[in-house]
Image (tube, grey):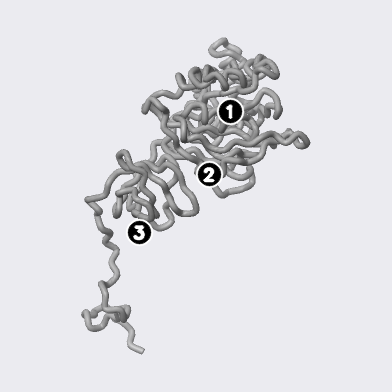
């Protein structure tokens, strides 16, 4: 068998046979200068529905993208048949750099990250005040994920006709989270939707919440007629809702100035992917107090400089308590 030495010429190099006689393989990718920009509305078993100008186009990911996958909210570049006609299929050839990525894991021990939505700038955390009972640990986890992704959280409390929102609002008042309280009568008359829309205009807002809290019902009241999704009910025995939304879907506000993204109801929100050191960034009033912290301080230990910072009156003690409660969230199960 011949071995190649230091000095070889082209005749010495073995080439992969190309029996089909077509073009040889190359690492040079086409530029696709004629590609059109699109916005991913939903993903269903590898098929992506995208908005291109004013048309809905169905597309698949081009092979050249490799393992890189597009998700709802992505800005993409598409080639092929962009007419939007029935049975046409285009190709996504590029994915724009994302401004934000909201992720979750199945649980805190699962290293596999699931991208919930891309390019959102607000996270609406929908929680029922009763039927089913509110789960503050779930809210905490969604808040941590929002802060880690750089999204502004919005707390949406539903079913206030069944019980008061005061207890939940007291828990989160020190975090300075924006909130909207709604009831079922307001949803029926449209008053609730109007108040929520005020918080959504000009933004891309992802809606999250566990099943049965009224998330999809609320989303249906926000979007134009004809775009509503199916809704479910709460099981009287288990107190839990039934999954009716199985995939994320981006829907435009009737004003044309903003998007809502309805996501499937979740039973858990794992935080394996979250770097705890980023959570402090959601508390700008406490950040200066960390300058005296030891290296790799968890901000929940004896040598943490934040205790002295707060005792000296630089920040509200309730804010430090809230920070530490969120930091501990990753260590607790949602039902604890």
Give the alpha-carbon distance from disc 2 to disc 3, as whole Å.
Answer: 25 Å
As drawn, is 307 to the left or to the right of 335?
left
The crowding category of the residue bearing disc 2, from other C-alpha atoms within 10 Å (few below 14, some 14 to 19, many at least 20), is some
Q: Quarter of the image containing the N terminus?
A: bottom left
Q: Nearer the viewer, mark 2 or mark 3?
A: 2
* Of the image marks 1 and 3, the number of the one nearer the N terminus: 3
**Is residue 85 placed above or below 159 in the rendered structure?**
below
Q: CA distance from mark 1 to mark 3?
A: 38 Å
Residue at label 1? Answer: 126
Could you say where residue 127 lies in the image, as x and y percent from the top left? Answer: 62, 27
Proximity of marks 2 and 3: CB atoms separated by less than 8 Å: no
The residue positioned farthest toward the top in the image shown: 313
Q: Residue at x 57, y 41 (%)?
A: 245
* Residue at disc 3, secondary structure: helix
Helix, strand or loop for disc 1: strand
Element marked by disc 2: loop
Residue 303 visible to an observer of this rendering:
no
Q: Is the residue 68 above or below the residue 120 in the image?
A: below
Asked if one can make out residue 234 in the rendered structure from this viewpoint, the answer is yes
Question: Observer-nearest residue: 274 or 303?
Answer: 274
Going from N to C along the chain, the mark reached first, 2 or 1, is 1
Tell me residue 21's x, y (percent): 26, 78
Specify whether 315 is left or right of 37: right
Which part of the image, by quadrant, shows the C terminus? top right
The image shows residue 228, relative to residue 315, as above or below, that is below
State left or right for residue 206 relative to residue 82. right
Q: Which residue is mark 2?
A: 247
Residue drawn where x is 70% and y is 27% of the image: 131
Q: Which residue is mark 3?
A: 64
- The image quarter containing residue 169 is top right
Whether pointer 1 and pointer 3 mark residues with C-beta atoms closer than 8 Å, the reply is no
**Residue 326, picture quadrant:** top right
């Amino acid at each position: 068998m011949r071995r190649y030495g230091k000095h070889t010429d082209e005749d010495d190099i073995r080439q992969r046979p190309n029996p089909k006689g077509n073009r040889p393989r190359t690492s040079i990718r086409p530029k696709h200068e004629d590609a059109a920009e699109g916005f991913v509305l939903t993903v269903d078993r590898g098929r992506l529905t995208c908005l291109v100008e004013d048309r809905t186009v169905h597309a698949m990911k081009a092979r050249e993208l490799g393992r890189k996958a597009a998700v709802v909210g992505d800005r993409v570049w598409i080639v092929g048949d962009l007419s939007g006609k029935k049975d046409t299929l285009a190709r996504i050839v590029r994915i724009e750099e994302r401004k934000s990525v909201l992720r979750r894991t199945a649980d805190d021990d699962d290293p596999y990250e699931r991208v919930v939505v891309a390019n959102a700038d607000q996270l609406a955390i929908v929680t029922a005040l009763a039927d089913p009972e509110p789960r503050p640990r779930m809210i905490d986890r969604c808040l941590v994920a929002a802060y880690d992704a750089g999204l502004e959280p919005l707390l949406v409390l539903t079913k206030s006709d069944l019980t008061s929102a005061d207890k939940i609002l007291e828990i989160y008042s020190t975090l300075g989270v924006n909130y909207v309280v709604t009831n079922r009568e307001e949803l029926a008359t449209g008053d609730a939707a109007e108040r929520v829309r005020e918080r959504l205009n000009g933004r891309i807002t992802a809606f999250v919440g566990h099943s049965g809290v009224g998330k999809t019902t609320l989303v249906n009241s926000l979007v134009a007629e004809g775009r509503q999704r199916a809704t479910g009910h709460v099981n009287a025995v288990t107190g839990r809702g039934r999954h009716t939304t199985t995939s994320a879907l981006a829907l435009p506000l009737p004003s044309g100035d903003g998007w809502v993204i309805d996501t499937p109801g979740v039973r858990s929100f794992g935080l394996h992917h979250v770097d705890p050191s980023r959570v402090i960034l959601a508390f700008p009033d406490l950040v200066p107090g960390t300058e005296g912290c030891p290296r790799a301080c968890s901000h929940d230990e004896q040598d943490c400089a934040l205790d002295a910072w707060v005792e000296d009156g630089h920040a509200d003690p309730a804010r430090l308590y809230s920070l530490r409660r969120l930091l501990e969230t990753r260590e607790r199960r949602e039902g604890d």
